[in-house]
Amino acid sequence: MYETTSEFYASANGDKWFLERGETAPSVIHRANPASGGAETRWSVDDFLKVAEDHPQVAALRNALAEPGGLEKGGNPSTTGKLDKAPTVYPWSVHRSSA
């Protein structure tokens, strides 16, 4: 199975964001810093762009997607529009297992 994961952003507090590309649609993985428990959260690119809005990791993701092969397989995520009601939690603040 073809799959690559590349880091596209690291915050000052040690959180890291990765773009995973492979046989299915690309996804964003957030890995919390060790002090926060190091939990990983996985989001579809489209969902991440809708929720994260104008945070620096979004600009970094857009740059990563703009690189040649940025979306090798999996289509083109929608990068326009906002949710009707902004969420009170951001993707990187919700800890989910990466099962």
Image (spheres, grey):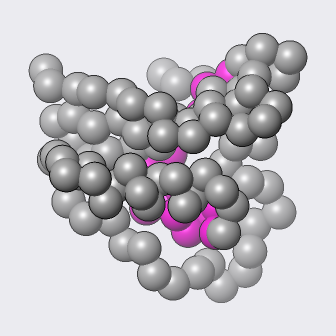
Position of the N terminus by quadrant: top left
Eyeballing the image, is 28 above or below 31?
Answer: below
- The residue closer to the viewer here, 12 or 80, is 12
Q: Name the residue: 47% across, 32% down.
A: 7
Instruction: Answer whether residue 50 is magenta in the image.
Output: yes
Eyeballing the image, is 28 above or below 36?
Answer: below
Q: Position of residue 29 (x, y in %)?
A: 51, 35
Q: Name the residue: 52% across, 53% down.
A: 60
Is residue 67 among the parts visible in the rendering? yes
Stretch of the chain drawn in magenta: 39-53
Q: Name the residue: 72% across, 38% down.
A: 11
Q: Position of residue 26 (x, y in %)?
A: 32, 45
Instruction: Answer whether residue 8 is magenta in the image.
Output: no
Among the 4 quarters of the image, the one containing residue 89: bottom right
Give the left or right position of residue 88, taking residue 24 as reference: right
Q: Position of residue 72 (x, y in %)?
A: 16, 46
Q: Name the residue: 27% across, 27% down.
A: 4
Give the left or right position of residue 50, taking residue 14 as reference: left
Q: Position of residue 80 (x, y in %)?
A: 45, 81
Give the left or right position of residue 84, taking residue 26 as reference: right
- The residue closer to the viewer here, 3 or 6, is 6
Give the left or right position of residue 19, taking residue 52 as reference: left
Is residue 42 among the parts visible in the rendering? no
